[in-house]
Image (cartoon, helix red, strand yellow):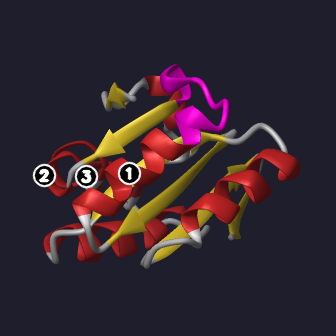
C-alpha cells in the first residue's frame, strides 16, 4: 500500500474538489480493519501501488481543503463537495480510508466482496461525471 499524496489528477477539473476518477474510496471506523482489508486486497491480486491507506489526519490535511477551494466563488453544483464533507465528518470521528483503483465494475465488485467482511462507513466509486454508492 502506498502513502497518500493528493495528485492534481485526483481533483475535479471544475472547482478542484477531490475527485479521483477510476478509484473507489472506502472509509472504516477501525484503522486496523482498513489496514487488514488493504492487505487482503493485495493477497487477492490487487497491486499495492493501486491502494492508498488514508489515516484520518491525511484526509483532513489533504482532501478536506479541496472543498473550500471548490466552493469559491459559488458552492459546488455536483455531489463531489458533499462527498468530501462526508469524508471529513468521518475523519473527525477517527475513521480511516482506503483509496483503491477500480477501473471497472468487476474490480469494484471484487473490492466490495472483501470490504463487506468488516464494518465500513461509506464506499464511493468515482467514475467520469458520476460518484456511485457501492
Q: Position of residue 61 (x, y in %)?
A: 16, 46
- Circle 3 residue: 59
Tell me which numbered mark, 3 or 1, is placed earlier along the sequence. 1
Q: How much space separates mark 2 and mark 1, taking CA atoms?
A: 19 Å
- In this image, 62 relative to 2: left or right? left
Estimate how packed mark 2 is, as few (under 14), some (14 to 19) or many (20 or more) residues with alpha carbons within 10 Å. some
Residue 90 vertical placement versus 59 (above, below): below
Mark 2 or 1: in front is 1
Q: Position of residue 102 (x, y in %)?
A: 70, 42
Q: Nearer the viewer, residue 118 or 64?
A: 118
Q: From which residue to which does the magenta span run?
A: 41-50
- Circle 1 residue: 36
Q: Are marks 2 and 3 in contact (CB under 8 Å)?
A: yes
Q: Residue at x 13, y 51 (%)?
A: 57
- Circle 2 residue: 57
Q: Residue at x 38, y 61 (%)?
A: 71
Mark 3 or 1: in front is 1
Q: Residue at x 86, y 49 (%)?
A: 106
Q: Are marks 3 and 1 in contact (CB under 8 Å)?
A: no
Amino acid at each position: 500500500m502506498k502513502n497518500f499524496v493528493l495528485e492534481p489528477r485526483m481533483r475535479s477539473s471544475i472547482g478542484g474538489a477531490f475527485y479521483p476518477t477510476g478509484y473507489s474510496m472506502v472509509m472504516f471506523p477501525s484503522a486496523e480493519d482498513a489496514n487488514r482489508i488493504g492487505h487482503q486486497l493485495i493477497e487477492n491480486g490487487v497491486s499495492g501501488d493501486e491502494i492508498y491507506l488514508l489515516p484520518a489526519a491525511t484526509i483532513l490535511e489533504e482532501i478536506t481543503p479541496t472543498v473550500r477551494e471548490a466552493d469559491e466563488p459559488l458552492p459546488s453544483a455536483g455531489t463531489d463537495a458533499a462527498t468530501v464533507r462526508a469524508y471529513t465528518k468521518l475523519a473527525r470521528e477517527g475513521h480511516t480510508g482506503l483509496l483503491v483503483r477500480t477501473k471497472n465494475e468487476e474490480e469494484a465488485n471484487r473490492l466490495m466482496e472483501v470490504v463487506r467482511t468488516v464494518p465500513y462507513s461509506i464506499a464511493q466509486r468515482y467514475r467520469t461525471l458520476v460518484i456511485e454508492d457501492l
